Image (cartoon, grey):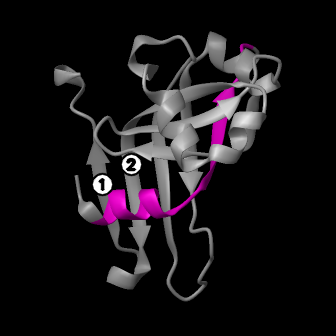
Amino acid sequence: MEKKITDFISKQTCGNLCCVAEDGSPYCFSFFYSFDEQGMMLYYKSSDETKHSEILYKNQNTAGTILPDKLNFLAIKGIQFEGEVLGPKHPEAKNASSHYHKKHPMTLAMPGDIWSIRLNRIKFTDNSLGFGKKLLWERDIANH
């Protein structure tokens, strides 16, 4: 994994996630996250009653984006990712709550569960490395 990718994700706080309902209609939402570099996971808080949670319980495949918290139009940077959303009770999500609440302690007062996104593919665009420069990463699914 390129350090530039993990550094970028670690420094940001908000992403956008897209999911697809059973009828094929897309749905997107924004979320605050914490990033687990070792497991290549993003964690976010949500409740079961949201439209996106209802969709993601049925179809875990997802895609999303992460942009800088402060945009610089001259040095475009951003992440496009693909992955799977793991529900709050998934075995791989056992450390999700402590990880997320360590980064966002104020959310302890908010209702909801911590969900996980297992990142499978990342494309990082970083124009500060040259116009249109892209760094790619893909999870080794065979060893997962």
Q: Which residue in the structure is indicated by mark 2?
A: 122
- Percent position of residue 124, x then y: 40, 61
- Percent position of residue 28, x then y: 73, 39
Among numbered discs 1 and 2, the one appearing first in the sequence: 2
Mark 1 lies on a secondary structure that is: strand
Tell me if I can see residue 31 in this picture: no
What is the quadrant of residue 59 in the picture? top right
The residue sitting at 35% across, 39% down in the picture is: 40
Work out whether residue 5 or residue 12 is closer to the camera in this orientation and state it. Answer: 12
Position of 19 with respect to 128 (left or right) is: right
Task: Please state the extent of the stretch shown in magenta in the rendering.
Answer: 4-22
What is the quadrant of residue 63 in the picture? top right
For mark 1, does the 10 Å Cα neighbourhood hold few (<14), some (14 to 19), or many (20 or more) residues? Answer: some
Magenta stretch: residue 137 in it? no
Q: Of the numbered discs in the image, which one, if any, rests on residue 12?
A: none
Q: Amino acid at mark 1?
A: Leu
Mark 2 lies on a secondary structure that is: strand
Q: Of the numbered discs in the image, which one, if any, rests on residue 136?
A: 1
Residue, far bottom:
74
Position of 89 with respect to 25 (left or right) is: left
Work out whether residue 5 or residue 32 is closer to the camera in this orientation and state it. Answer: 32
Asked if the residue under mark 2 is in contact with the one under mark 1, i.e. CB atoms within 8 Å, the reply is yes
The residue sitting at 37% across, 41% down in the picture is: 121
Q: Is 105 placed above or below 83 here? A: below
